[in-house]
Structures are given as C-alpha cells and as structure tokens.
Image (cartoon, helix red, strand yellow):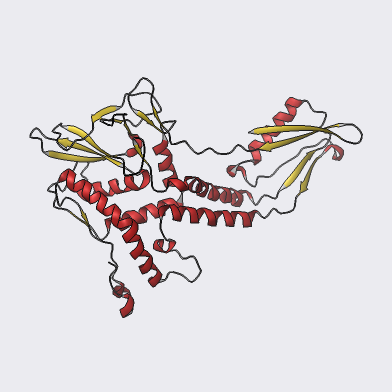
Amino acid sequence: ILKETRKCSNMADKRLNFTTIVQETKKIPSFDCVKAKNTSYVKYGLDNNYPQYLWNLFENSSQMSAIILQMKDYIIGNGIKSTYPLKIVNRKLETFDDMIEKVILSYLIYGGFAVQIIRNKLGEIKEINNLDFRFVRINEDEDKIYYSKEWNKGRRQPIIYPRYKFDSSEPNTVFYYKGKITNEVYPIPMYISAITSIEISTQIPTYHLSNLCNSFNPSVLINFNNGGNLPEDVMNEIEEKVYDKFAGTDNAGRILLSFNDDKEHSTEMVRLPSDGNIDQYNSLANNVEKDIYTAFRINRVLLGDSSNETGFSKQPYIEAFALYQKSVIGPIQKELEKIFNNLLGEGSLEFSKFVIDWSEYGSDENTSKIIE
C-alpha cells in the first residue's frame, strides 16, 4: 500500500490532513534468465517460477484456456497416425497419443516441451515420458536438464539428466525443445505480448463475483468527524483497516459500520456520483479479449463465439478455419512431426487435418464439403 499525506491550511489557519490510499499495482513476473548461485542451471524467470505463473494463467483465464484447448484439438485433428511400435509408451500406461497430447499442451502453454527417453541394455527405446515443463530447468551450455518439483522450497537437490543427442546411447536422457523463439535457454510462448491482458482477464471475474456476493458498492467519501486531533499512529491504523476491508477485488462491496458516541462526532459517508464503472469494465473486457485473440492469432468464431448477436454462422467459420489452418495450425503440425520423426523414426508421428462433414448436420450443397 502506498500512502501519501498532504497538509494544507484553511482560512482559519487550521491544519487539515488529507490522506490518499493507493492500492499497489500488481507486478507481472519478470521473464529473465539468470544463472542460479552455487549451481549450474539457469533460473526460469527472476524467481525461478515463471512456468508456474504461465500455468496459473492457463488455469484461471477462461479465454486463454479455451483458446489453447481448442488449438490442441485442431492440431490433433481427426486423429494421430503413427507407425511407432510402442503402443503403451511408459509405466504410467500412457499410449503414444496420450503422450503427444501432453507434448502439444506443453508447447502451447510454455512454447516448448521436454521428453524423457529411457533405453534398455540394447540401446532400444523402451519408455517415453513427457516431463511437466514447470519443473524443468537447463544449464547455460544446454547439455544438462534439471528436474525438481520443489525449486523454491530448497528441500531436495534436482535430478540431473544429460540432454538427449541423436547419436546418444545413454540409458536415461531428456529431449529438450525450446521452440524457435527463445529468451536465451527458455522458450517464449506465442501469447507473450498479451500476458498483461491475460492477467487482467483473471481479475475481472473475481471483482464481479465479490460485488455479487456482497452487494454492489457505491463510491463514497468517508469523513471521520473530529478526527483531525487523533494521533498519527491511530490515523494510520484506521487507514490500514479501511484498506483491508474495502480495497482489492476480494473486498468489493463490503458494508461499513460506524459506532459513534453521538451524532455530532459520527462518521459521515457522502455518496459520490456514479463513475461509470460498468461501462469501464465492459470496455476493458472487450479490449482485453481482443488483445488475447490477437496474440493467439485466432478468430473468436473458431471457438464457437460470434462478435455479433446473430449466433454461430457456418460460412464465416469455414473461412476463418481455412486461414488458421494455413497460417498457424499447419506449421505447428509440421514442426512437431519433423521433431518426432527425427527422434523416433520416420512415420512415428503424422497429424490428420481437422475436418467437419457438414452434411451430417443437414447442410446445403455449397457448405457441406469437408474442410481441408
């Protein structure tokens, strides 16, 4: 909380205290790469917790999660084709398709992924595990992978794996992919430019929920009559308690009770004219949503949403998907296919295109064609 106290003199030369209570601005975590002290790995963000922050955004932003999950479905298309011999790829009984789905999700959230490759004594791959990218770190030379679920607790030393090399025969390695756009040793997600907007999108529902639960809060001016003679420490305590009760999204709309000795020394609350918060929030929500869609390069119609109130329209969807397939989904499919075909052998991964046979829904001849 930032406090600013200003003093001025009135016509009677009395001292008046005006205190402004300002809520501290939420800081977006910094995505800087710094070598950790006394270790060889590079911190993933200044607090070494940046991937967890990205995961929290994914969990709490309805727009971000909807877009990423829809993109995942578009990338998988109408099924994964694979000639890879292992159908169950690890001891968790995951299929090859299960593992690839996790890889895609990691790629979309973090911009990269990590896959553990375990070989038998003959050097043959016997197990493949997608590693949770929140817990993956790498060194400056990018030849060692560090894995820990307790980076900021300091209780355990991370597990260290050699990074996978195509000519490697080591029994336990990690294939680490940081994408094409990076911040030194770590990947940059495609939506990085909309991080602030995504953060805002997680806060707006909390504010509105609090208002609904506690009744809508009018803007008021609180006058503590005869309070000018209070000691400064008492004033500060009052300020802090007012802030604790009323500031922030979790405290919107609370009711103030004032217990007074008499009417002359009562607390005075003056209702201020409406500041148009509803219009402000509607405008903010629209701008935030637009920014998020732009960062993901996706048209809202591809999520079954329409910018107008006419409902879902088939033809705009077909046109929007054709462009998105060509410019975003197709390149990601080719990128992942190339990686896994080099890693596991040609034919190991092939995505089929996402197609809809509109004739199943009684479409006319012009729009019943399968999207290709």
Q: Which of 166 and 211 lies nearest the eye of the viewer?
A: 166
Above or below, 328 against 145 in this view is below
Q: Is residue 115 left or right of residue 328?
A: left
Q: Quadrant of residue 243?
A: top right
Provide residue 74's location: percent of width, then percent of height. Answer: 31, 58
Residue at the spot 48% in from the left edge and 71% down from the top edge: 310
Q: Which of 184 and 240 lies nearest the eye of the viewer?
A: 184
Residue at the spot 71% in from the left edge and 54% down from the top edge: 274
Residue 368 is at least partly visible in this image: yes
Look at the image and tell me in which quarter the C terminus lies: bottom left
Q: Residue furthest bottom?
A: 365
Residue at the spot 29% in from the left edge and 29% down from the top edge: 141
Q: Is residue 298 left or right of residue 371?
A: right
Provide residue 153's location: percent of width, then percent of height. Answer: 40, 26
Residue at the spot 16% in from the left edge and 45% down from the top edge: 344
Total numbered labels placed on residues in the image: 0
Provide residue 318's location: percent of width, then percent of height. Answer: 35, 68
